[in-house]
Amino acid sequence: MPGGVGYSPHMADKDLEPKQVSGSQVTLVQLMEISDANIAGIVHGGTIMKLVDTAAGLAAMKHCGGPVVTVSMDTMSFLAPVRIGDMVTVRASVNDVGRTSLEVGVRVESENVLSGERTHTGSAYLVFVALDEEGKPRPVPSVVAQGQTQRRRQKEAKIRRQTRLAHKQAIQEHRAEVRREQVVAPPRDDQPQDDEESARRSHLRM
């Protein structure tokens, strides 16, 4: 999460006004050097992920008008390798918002600076939560999607959110079921009964 930006409660009304996607879009450009890559000359995935998180965090902060924290990286797809000497462009924009959270989509492209060839090398979707001056979640402004592409991204973001919630609920239900089974399950044949276990412990103390 990028730092250095505070949030004032006096800005609350203004901050909750709907905002256009274009108002918070961020573009980062960086040349990949030897320190960014492995011995094969391919840039580390972690280097790309850091750029992705930085760009997405800045876009989220611009939209919210205050600090945010990264909650999750919903998806990070590496589509093609990035090599030493490539120029990497990372573009981030807010796709959709909830009450206190928002999803930011990121597109990563690499360019061979000699040939000018550009390649779509990665895509990611990150979820952030806006924080107030006490570090607690706070409401975020709605986002105005304009044009077919932005509306498509917003709809897909809602689908991803529903999928995350359904996944979380399914895991919680499964774990609750496992706990119930552990409570009511009878001892297995290979496990000592209570009286046998007691006798065994007494024997070990002798």
Image (spheres, rainbow, N blue to C red):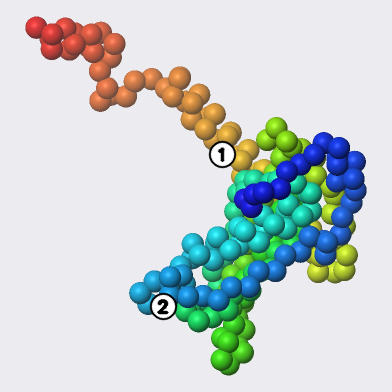
Marks 2/1 in contact by CB < 8 Å: the verdict is no
Quarter occupied by residue 206: top left
Coordinates of residue 198 in the picture (x, y in percent): 23, 8
Q: Name the residue under label 2.
A: 41
**Front one among 141 and 170:** 141
Quarter occupied by residue 203: top left
Q: Residues within 10 Å of mark 1 (few under 14, many from 20)?
A: few
User: How far apart are the alpha carbons under marks 2 and 1?
Assistant: 40 Å
Q: Is residue 40 above or below residue 15?
A: below
Q: What residue type is labelled 1?
A: Ile
The answer to whether residue 174 is visible is yes
Q: In this view, does 132 lie to the left or right of 198?
A: right
Quarter occupied by residue 121: bottom right
Taking the spot 35% from the left edge, 74% from the top edge, the residue there is: 39
Kind of element beneath mark 2: loop
Coordinates of residue 24 in the picture (x, y in percent): 79, 60
User: Which of pointers 2 and 1 indicates the residue nearer the eye?
Assistant: 2
Q: Is residue 103 above or below residue 108?
A: above
Residue 153: which numbered mark, if any? none
Q: Residues within 10 Å of mark 2 (few under 14, many from 20)?
A: some
Taking the spot 64% from the left edge, 49% from the top edge, the residue there is: 3
